[in-house]
């Protein structure tokens, strides 16, 4: 269940990280490339001793996730080590989208601007930095697509080997945008949950392979806190009132919340109340279903949706997503494939941002949450747009295209525009 601890070349430096703690019963253990507690079999999470962290120190840092290095499990000199330098993406005031949705104030966190065009560059950069400290030499993952891109690119930049496992049915663009980095890309005949199981077996066998979302998952997942940190800093050092987050494994949602709480506890923002909302595709909505039924466990499902990046039928952090959403007073909804495409088109038409299917899920879910009275139209709302539409062109293929194809004449264009 856990990878063997690699001998490290030097004293372990993971910055403010001090221990791992089990999520269920709080058992503590030393920092290691392990992800499940041997005591209570629950996921392990990084515990910190932050000391004093000031706004000025963060503001003086680089325009990447490393400005928050004092809040991450990474070495103190992390920005000097070759990496893809993710983060620092735009927070866009989205007035036209707000109007279309019937909301007063909406911000879009546009994470398509990362090096491989999704938020996964954040988590992979943190995982790679921690994996280096543990003495691994190969970066690996099972992936629904975006993680594959991020791992292959980060390994290439670091001069590491990569082993990336994907379901063979993945979007063509996501396969090509991983293969281009020339690592070991393996397409598996099976769905993501099959691929994930395979990765767990391989992680136990290969002690020099860091599977970012398996054996070094506690470190990897902390990278998603930087989405929360950036949103709060970009809002002028304050928390939004509502945030809508897409769910696959559920890690991102729980860590955005953790980021907000850490900023609050450290006095970097005022601890104002906020609600966290979750977004899923109906064709893979185990967490949304559990929320609707008032359950605290998540029943696995077999995914069938165009939102393949979110197609995790057995989400590792499902129960913790339910905890966060219930604690903050949010909600979870799911939307059909048709609504996802509409969500993609709505964001493109109102804000000029082309998102992948996961972003379509977020926008369409926000719309549904407003219609069902769960999102407050008067509260300031942030939508997390976590990936780029160029990777999921098949979702819009055949539904959009030129208004007309005409000969090169002014009359023909005029007629086409009038028609
Ligand atoms: C674009 C995009 N957004 C959101 C997610 C959800 O991430 P998590 O597994 O942390 O819930 C994924 C997961 O692959 C993704 O690719």
Image: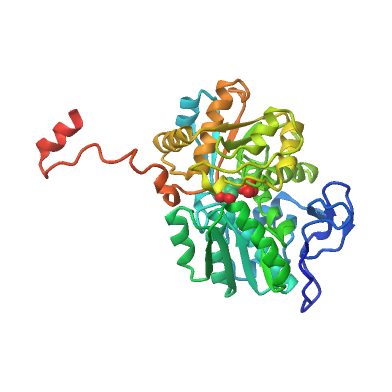
| Horizontal and vertical percent position of residue 286 | 65, 38
Q: Nearer the viewer, residue 251 or 111?
A: 251
Left or right: 4 in relation to 139: right
| Horizontal and vertical percent position of residue 51 | 83, 55
Picture quadrant where residue 13 is located: bottom right
Q: How many marks?
A: 0
| Horizontal and vertical percent position of residue 405 | 18, 41
The relative height of residue 143 versus residue 406 in the rendered view (above or below) is below
Colour scheme employed for the rendering of this structure: rainbow
The relative height of residue 377 versus residue 382 in the rendered view (above or below) is above
The reply to whether residue 290 is in sight is yes
Q: Nearer the viewer, residue 306 or 68?
A: 306
Q: Quadrant of the C terminus?
A: top left
Q: Quadrant of the N terminus?
A: bottom right
Left or right: 346 in relation to 153: left
- Residue drawn 72% across the image and 58% down it: 219
- Residue drawn 62% across the image and 55% down it: 194
Left or right: 227 in relation to 114: right
Residue lying furthest front: 189
Q: Nearer the viewer, residue 47 or 364?
A: 364
| Horizontal and vertical percent position of residue 273 | 73, 31
Q: Nearer the viewer, residue 20 or 265?
A: 20
- Residue drawn 56% across the image and 35% down it: 282
Residue lying furthest bottom: 9
The reply to whether residue 87 is in sight is no
């Amino acid at each position: 269940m856990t990878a063997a601890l690699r001998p490290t070349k030097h004293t372990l430096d993971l910055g403010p990280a001090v221990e791992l703690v089990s999520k269920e019963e709080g058992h503590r253990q030393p920092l290691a490339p392990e992800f499940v507690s041997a005591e209570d079999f629950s996921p392990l999470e990084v515990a910190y001793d932050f000391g004093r962290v000031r706004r000025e120190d963060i503001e003086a840092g680089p325009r990447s996730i490393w400005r928050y290095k004092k809040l991450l499990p990474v070495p103190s000199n992390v920005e000097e080590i070759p990496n893809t330098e993710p983060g620092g993406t735009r927070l866009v005031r989205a007035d036209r989208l707000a109007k279309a949705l019937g909301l007063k104030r909406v911000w879009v966190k546009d994470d398509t601007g990362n090096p491989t065009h999704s938020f996964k560059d954040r988590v992979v950069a943190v995982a790679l930095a921690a994996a280096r400290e543990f003495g691994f030499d190969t970066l690996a993952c099972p992936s629904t697509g975006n993680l594959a891109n991020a791992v292959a690119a980060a390994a290439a930049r670091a001069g590491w080997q990569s082993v990336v496992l994907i379901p063979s049915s993945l979007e063509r663009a996501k396969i090509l945008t991983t293969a281009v980095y020339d690592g070991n890309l393996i397409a598996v005949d099976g769905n993501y949950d099959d691929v994930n199981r395979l990765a767990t077996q391989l992680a136990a066998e290969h002690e020099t392979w860091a599977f970012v979302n398996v054996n070094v998952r506690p470190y990897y997942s902390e990278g998603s806190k930087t989405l929360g940190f950036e949103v709060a800093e970009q809002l002028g050092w304050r928390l939004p009132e509502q945030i809508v987050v897409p769910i696959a494994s559920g890690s991102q949602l729980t860590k955005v919340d953790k980021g907000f709480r850490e900023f609050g506890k450290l006095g970097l923002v005022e601890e104002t109340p906020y609600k966290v909302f979750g977004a899923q595709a109906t064709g893979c909505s185990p967490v949304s279903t559990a929320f609707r039924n008032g359950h605290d466990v998540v029943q696995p499902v077999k995914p069938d949706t165009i939102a393949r990046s979110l197609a995790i039928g057995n989400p590792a952090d499902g129960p913790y997503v339910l905890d966060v959403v219930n604690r903050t007073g949010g909600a979870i909804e799911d939307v059909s494939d048709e609504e996802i495409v509409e969500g993609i088109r709505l964001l493109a038409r109102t804000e000029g941002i082309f998102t992948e299917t996961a972003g379509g899920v977020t926008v369409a879910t926000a719309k549904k949450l407003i219609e069902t009275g769960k999102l407050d139209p008067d509260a300031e709302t942030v939508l997390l747009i976590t990936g780029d539409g160029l990777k999921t062109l098949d979702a819009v293929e055949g539904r959009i295209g030129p208004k007309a194809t005409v000969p090169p004449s002014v009359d023909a264009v005029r007629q086409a525009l009038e028609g």
